[in-house]
Image (cartoon, grey):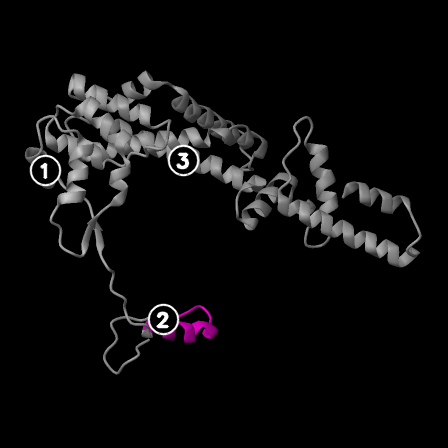
Amino acid sequence: MSLTSDPPGGFATTLHAKDLPRLVEALATPFTPLPFARVGFDEAAFRRTLAALPHGSSTATVVEALHYVSALPGRLRYHDAELNMGGAYDLVDRFVGDLPTAERVVQLHSPVPWRDGFVVPFVKEFLRQNREYGKVGLMSALTNVGGNMIGALEAVERAMHKEKERGDGRVDLVLRRRVAHTVQDLESLHRAVVVYIWTGFRLPVVYADYDVAEPLKRRVEVAMQWVLEGISMAGGGDGKVARQKSWKEVVGEKDWEVESGGAEHTQRHLAQRAEPSRPYIPSASRVAMKGAGAQRVARIVAERGKGGSSNEGSETKKAE
């Protein structure tokens, strides 16, 4: 689509024809220039500022000086978030304050989720090993801090293997629900490994266990995907299709009759198969079952009169 007679620089369209006027309006809207752009400090700026400050100035002082006295062009600003990382700066000063400036800046720019209380101890261990030994071992750091995250990964992998051993290709939602609590541990472990890999690309001699970190990262990603799929299938996700597919696999294709009004039968069938562990009924299924029950009650009332009663109607109300 082109709004002028000039050759178009590209083409755009919409899925539905009714949306084309909105696209034309959007393309005709003039660009609004940004008032300024955000930039971050680099090693050269950090080194120059550090040299201009009194000896022993903290990292936080250097960053504040960069923000408040740097002669940046009028359309550039430093990131305000850099002023709110005092705890991270103190940690860097404590562990790597006496290391070369280049290493300090790398640690400041590393993608550490400082609000994740499970990842920060690993970062502290990375920095401690860097200061004391001049190299950082990934598995030794994970072991020294604690084995909860590795234990969570191994627990999920055992569950995956157990589900695969069944050989029927069906999803065991009960099994997946038992390890659903490991999601946060897996996410934190993944973040810690990513920090190690990211830093290793910039300090490969110090963070030299890439051959260990990369396979571990893949293992964690596979485990997280497996657990998250189970949570989504059990009703904790947003995808209605995923939930329907999972319950088809659990109760069988013939018993999945929500669209044809047979959801109550599906509920009873699930209850019979759930002993001793009752499966979680997703909210979408509960709504469908209530709707089917309401229609059934309305049909009974219409047939027998408003004052009538029947065992069938009582059973329906109890099911609701």
Of residues 225 and 181, the one nearer the viewer is 181
Q: Please tell me which residue is depicted at 25% across the width and 33% down the height of the picture.
A: 197
Q: What is the three-letter code of the residue carrying label 1?
A: Thr
Q: Say which of marks 3 and 1 sits in front.
A: 1
Horizontal and vertical percent position of residue 94: 21, 22
Q: Is residue 91 left or right of residue 220?
A: left
The verdict on residue 215 being magenta is: no
Question: From which residue to which does the magenta span run?
Answer: 13-27
Distance between the alpha carbons at the discs numbered 1 and 2: 45 Å
Residue at 63% over, 47% down = 284
User: If you read the primary sequence from the N terminus, does the residue marked by circle 3 or circle 2 appear first?
Assistant: 2
Q: Secondary structure at mark 2?
A: helix
Q: CA distance from mark 3 to mark 1?
A: 44 Å
Q: Residue 240 in the image: state x and y as whole percent.
A: 57, 49
Residue where numbered disc 1 is placed:
49
Q: Comparing marks 3 and 2, which lies closer to the viewer? A: 2
Q: Is residue 196 visible?
A: no
Examine the rendered structure and indicate whether residue 254 appears above or below residue 28. Answer: above
Q: Position of residue 225 (x, y in %)?
A: 44, 38
> SS class of the residue under badge 3?
helix
Instruction: Judge the density around disc 2: few (<14), some (14-19), many (≥20) Cα neighbours within 10 Å.
Output: few
Question: Element under label 1?
Answer: helix
Q: Amino acid at mark 2?
A: Ala
At x 28%, y 18%, the residue is 140
Q: Specify the amino acid type for callout 3.
A: Val
| Disc 3/disc 2 C-alpha distance (Å) | 40 Å
The mark that comes first in sequence, 3 or 1, is 1
Residue underneath mark 3 = 222
Badge 3: few (under 14), some or many (20 or more) residues near its Cα, within 10 Å?
some
Marks 1 and 2: which is nearer the front? 1
Residue 26 is labelled as 2
